[in-house]
Amino acid sequence: MEGRLQNRIAVVTGGAAGLGKATAIRLAKEGAILEILDLNDASAAVEEIKAPGGVAYSTICDCADEEQIAAAVKEIEARHGHIDILVNNAGILTGRKPWYTLTREEVNRYVQVNYIGYFLVTKAFYPLIKKSSVPRVIMVASRTYFLANPGQMSYVASKGAVISGLRRAARPCPRSRRVRPGQQARRERETARIRASIARRNPTRPPRASRTLWRRE
């Protein structure tokens, strides 16, 4: 498996299933060596990466527990010495529930996992990221922060904290990025729709390769 990320060390939290697993597999297809951290067994994801020739390892880790995170970092450092990519993806999603029925414990759980967890993982891996000549830190956020989905106050607040916190953390590290699943795909569809509309109105005008329809965040 060779690609743009050949032999780069990528850590993906919450990579046993869902979006995290898909991210890990895609990075592996680009040649990255994967380290998957998850509260659940990620052996299925590891085997799927290894099947076509990829390299992957998995570690059981609660990404909101400092001791478990420290142990995982130590293990990965012993294996590689550094990392090049960190994808903070591990999180929990709330069902819809009126905000005034939430307990302090419920709200705190989402903040601890979805925000504090990202902070703890990034802080713990920071010494290894600094060793890379091409460091990348990616935080999986959510468009719900902007939509203010009803009944999901705890989740929305925790993802808002991720977005706001990264603005500060990214200042000394311009290679840090946040992504919002779903919204990226929507933007691509909307961009295609706009291009098609422009082509219909101006059939003789060739498309401009450099035309910018969306600003970089």
Image (spheres, grey):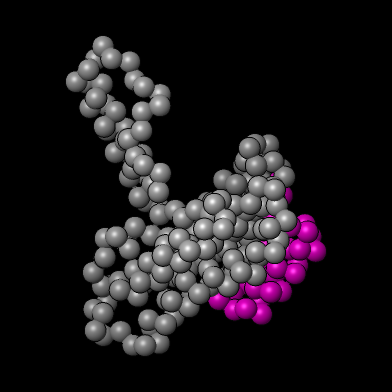
Q: Is residue 45 left or right of residue 104?
A: right
Chain part drawn in magenta: 54-83
Examine the structure image and report whether residue 78 is included in the region drawn in magenta. yes
Q: Residue at point 56% right, 58% down?
A: 172
Q: Residue at point 77% right, 57% down?
A: 80
In this rendered view, identify the residue nearer to me: 96 or 216: 216
Return the residue found at the far right: 78
Q: Quadrant of residue 200?
A: top left
Work out whether residue 93 can be spotted: no
Percent position of residue 6, x then y: 69, 41
Q: Quadrant of residue 164?
A: bottom left
Q: Is residue 213 left or right of residue 137?
A: left
**Quarter occupied by the N terminus:** top right
Percent position of residue 59, x then y: 67, 67
Percent position of residue 8, x then y: 69, 47
In this rendered view, identify the residue nearer to me: 155 or 162: 162
Q: Is residue 87 above or below residue 60?
A: above
Work out whether residue 65 can be spotted: yes
In this rendered view, identify the residue nearer to me: 56 or 67: 67
Examine the structure image and report whether residue 88 is included in the region drawn in magenta. no
Q: Residue at point 40% right, 48% down?
A: 217
Return the residue found at the far front: 172
Return the residue found at the far left: 201
Percent position of residue 190, x then y: 29, 38
Return the residue found at the far top: 204
Q: Residue at point 69% right, 70% down?
A: 72
